[in-house]
Amino acid sequence: MKRSMHAQAGTALVELALAMPLLIIVLLGAVELGRYAYFSIQVANAARAGAQYGAQNGATSLDSAGIRAAAQADGTNSIAALNVSPNQYCQCWNGASASAVSCTGSCPVGSHIVSYVSVQVSGTINPLFHYPLLPSALTVTNTAIMRVFQQ
């Protein structure tokens, strides 16, 4: 009996040494996935902040610089550079359906113009480590659309 215990001495250390590289790779993958998820949430929040600023009224929906500033101010916690693209578009709404129209145009009788602000935000995240067969940078894009408040 003593001989079999002596023959197994150190096997746990060998197993740990063999499994440790795989465990480290899984841990690093989980960290990178968490960073990517956090970055995606930050980009979505920045797009929503820009859209909220633009949706306040007709004047702010046309204020591209203000929309960009609102989106970038929300994303400054962890994002180095954001690309913000605001856009305003309008539709004729009759209660059942909508059709595209110029924001300076008019709608047929029984319809009214509804304007929207759309903010697309994109940012690039670099992984902590460079992995073979994976891109060196990932671009995250999100769009928020809100109806402009009309009195």
Image: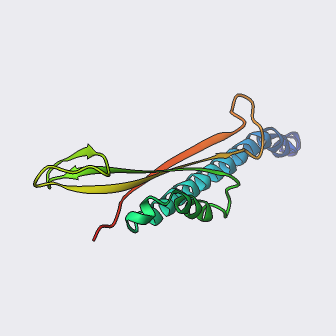
Q: Position of residue 17 (x, y in %)?
A: 83, 41
Number of disc labels = 0
Q: Please name the residue shown 42% across and 65% down the image.
A: 59
On the picture, is 116 further left or further right than 79? left
Q: Position of residue 63 (x, y in %)?
A: 49, 60
Rendering colour mode: rainbow
Q: Position of residue 86 (x, y in %)?
A: 49, 52
In the rendered image, the vertical position of residue 135 relative to residue 101, given as above or below: above
The one of 57 and 130 positioned closer to us in this rendering? 57
Q: Please name the residue shown 72% across and 44% down the image.
A: 126
Quadrant containing the C terminus is bottom left
Quadrant containing the N terminus is top right
Q: In this view, which residue lies farthest toward the bottom? A: 151
Q: Please name the residue shown 37% across and 64% down the image.
A: 58
The one of 88 and 108 positioned closer to us in this rendering? 108
The one of 106 and 129 positioned closer to us in this rendering? 106
Q: Position of residue 121 (x, y in %)?
A: 54, 50
On the picture, is 20 further left or further right than 135? right
Q: Please name the residue shown 58% across and 45% down the image.
A: 140
On the picture, is 77 further left or further right than 150? right
Q: In this view, which residue lies farthest toward the top? A: 133
